[in-house]
Amino acid sequence: MELAGLNSKERLLLVLCVISYFCVSTDAEASCKLKAKFNLSGYKDVEKKTVVIGGMFPIHNRLASTNSNTTNAPESSDCEGFNFRTFRWAQTMLFAIKEINARTDLLPKTDLGYVIYDSCFTISKAVEGTLTFLTGQDEAVPNYRCGDGPPLSALIGAGGSDLSIATARILGLYYFPQMSYESSCSVLESRFQYPTFLRTIPSDEHQSVAMARLVLHFGWTWVGTIAAEDDYGKYGIKRFKELVEEAGVCTSFSETLPKVSSPEAIQRIVRTVLDSTAKIIVVFSSDVDMSPLVKELLLNNVTNRTWIASEAWVTSAAISRHHDILPVLGGTIGFAVRKATIPRLEEHLLQIDPYQDPLTEEFWEIAFNCTLSYQKAMRNARMARESGNITSAQDVRLAPEGLCNGKEMLGRLNNTFTDVSQLRITYNVYKAVYAVAHALHNLEHCVPGKGPFDGGSCANIDKFEPWQLMYYLKNLRFIVPHTGEEIYFNNGDVEGFYEILNWQSDSEGGVTYHPIGYYNGTVPIDKRLTIDNTSIIWNNEILEPPRSVCSERCQPGTRMGIRQGEPVCCFDCIPCADGEISNTTDARGCIQCHEDDWSNANHDECVPKTIEFLDFSEPLGITLIAISAFGALLTIVVAIIFLMHLNTPLVQVNDPLLSFTLLFGLVITFLCSIVFLGEPQMWSCMTSQVALAEGFALVLSSIMGKSALLMLRARAVKAVKTATKKAKAAAAASEQSPDTAVIAPAIPQKNDVDPIHPRHQRAIMIVCTLIQAVGCTVWLILVPPHPVKNMAAQNIKIILECDPGNIIFICSIFGFDILLAIIAFAFAFVARKLEDNFSEGKSVTFGMLVFFIVWISFVPAYLSTRGKFMVAVQIFAILASSFGLLACIFIPKVYVLLIKPERNKEEMLITRPKSRDAAANGSSASIASTANGTTVSTVSLDE
């Protein structure tokens, strides 16, 4: 079988088998012997015990340095850096076992033994301890259980997550239960990789979520992260970053605390903290790994930072009892596991025997800074004398100064070992021991025939397999003594509950862990985090939460603009464009207002657009109405004057009916301009456009009818003028030849000059008006004008206006009016030189010129205006052109009718030729000559 086809478990088992093969001698006398011997320290009591519980605690912080020279046989390293806190954990396990053995309701017939090893906070020592524990003797033999001692039940340990991961892989091979009190790494949730791993501490999945929710609770978007260089730190901070980054929080820096002492790395981390603008720093680390960083922070006086602590160091006295720690770490917020009070534990701790074993002896000597060995004390005194520190006269008196008597009072010590005010991990150890004990109790009291194994069988407490105990651990549920907490395992894990602590100053200037809330992972998501903000004291005694942002929050009316190449939390606040708003802080984008709304000045609210149209009630509307009404009234007055003088020559000279239709058309144009005012409606849009087109068609067709007659008169007069010239030439010739007689053309009378009659003029007017009416009718039926909201002309306004419906129709309709105007102007222009006391041709010509000037000026004025002023320009054009026609065509006639009635005579209106002799002065003259008794009359025409 190839190694590549093996999984991790099979490979590890194969390695252990190979090692055991080479390590075990074939000689029966030398069975179970290893070539190397482990150097382990701890506690052991297995004699005459029913069941043994294993334990592993990192009582020392590190391995002592050793000589790496391979010329000598390698030896297992010693440990150094005694840890009072973890030593208390080990003593708690001893206390719990002692308490259980004394109970009559729990394992009454079973006496528990123990084997406890020091893992030295290193994986190698944890593996050594695990192999030795499984072997059952001081010399480990992989894959073998040597001796017939009491059965092994479970291993409680092995401390940090890295240590437990290593031991869990080995224990999982044999389906041997492991109960951890401190290993919270989320990787250990995998039942595939770690099938027998259980723990009394919540998984870091809960802690990472709790930290993320804490950051979001205070609105921090710019944080730094520091993690220990192990699985605990790596996976905990990784999950935290995933959660906060999903919520828009950015990481200013991510640093790793080295496992091996590295002053350069620690100094680099401190420089990073100082250089960063992040005021919030999240640390996932044990107190052992955190301690070097804390010392460097104190040296550099790093203040004005808020630290978020994981449960592994938040209540560590090794950190909080540093001198002048509050200016640096004061205000720290951290998550701690449940705290409990364990009765009689303090009494047990204070009554330990320093001569019990080497580990306790080492603790005693370090705690009291002395030695329990008289020889060692004397040796130290001799060395001091040789160095000159003491005199020979003092030898007898000073030699015992370094000697302990074993009766020193532990109660007088002020260290972590005797401090039982924060029993958190200690409580987890206590629960772990009781969990194993309750599982053993259930195993022991199994009823044969009702057991969980094959055929309803039960396991024997004196000789059971680890996998049988694992069944009871998985299905365990019990109440912890003295606290009432119910313990059960959900896939090997317990409920995620944390107390949130705040580092505050006590009365003596030290650190007190003040509870400010809690996190409960079993309740609904929105209720899991509970914090009393008012009870928090921040760094430097500040009461307000610190701000930690890369960029200040974008206020409503702006949006976040990401800076190229920088984290998303570093942004510029860009004002929203016109017509867009943002009504929240830190808006990712602006919201487009509805088409009927527009952004206000602050761009934080959409307000209804201003509705604009030319209203009747505003001053401009009132003015236009007054002018329109005046024009219509003036036109009616002119019509009345014409009716009063209907039978006079001036009124009758050019079909009075056309004059009245022209006046009626002008009344229509004056009044239709009023319909353009007010809010556009369907009826008003249709009426205004059609009335304007039809009114001008009536006016222009009437003018065209009049102009046609004037044009024909002008042509007739021109013909008479030509004949007169010929007559004059003949007369001149007759003076030289008296025998010749020339007869001059007769004076043209009205009926002789007018080639068309009023009925023809009226027909022109009616036909043109009907054509326009038909066009307007088709327009109204197919695509009638209708009101629309013009939102494109001005952003902040909605302009209510009339849409013509179809550009082709409106161009055709008003193009027809333009055609009529051009024809009428052409006819009037030809007739402009007709000479009489009232030159109607000139009046019409001037009226049409005014008409063209007004509408040609209207086009650029109309296109350059917006909103209601477009309507005003259009109304002004209508009124100006109407007043121009009324003034030029009718006011001269009204002047004659009212002021100069003597000119209102038929002979004054007859077209007269203008004489060209020396007496020609613009008046009529008659030249009579007699030839053969015939009178010749000549008419002088204005050329």
Image (cartoon, rainbow, N blue to C red):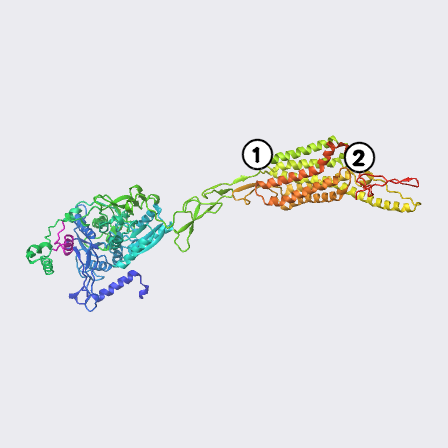
- Kindly identify the residue that appears in the image at 88 percent across and 46 percent down: 732
Q: Which label was assigned to residue 906?
A: 2
Depth check, mark 2 against mark 1: the one in front is 2
Q: Is residue 20 above or below residue 203?
A: below
Front residue of 287/94: it is 287
| Residue 761: quarter of image | top right
Magenta region includes residue 358: yes
Q: Which residue is mark 1?
A: 617
Residue 721 at what x, y percent from top left? 82, 44
Whichever of labels 2 and 1 marks the residue nearer the N terminus, that label is 1
Report the quarter where the N terminus lies: bottom left
Disc 2 packing (10 Å; few <14; some 14–19; many ≥20): few
- At label 2, which amino acid type do we have? Glu
Side (left or right) of 911 relative to 444: right
Side (left or right) of 42 relative to 837: left
Tell me how many marks there are: 2
- At label 1, which amino acid type do we have? Ser
Front residue of 423/67: it is 67
Residue at the bottom extreme, as displayed: 71
**Range drawn in magenta:** 351-371
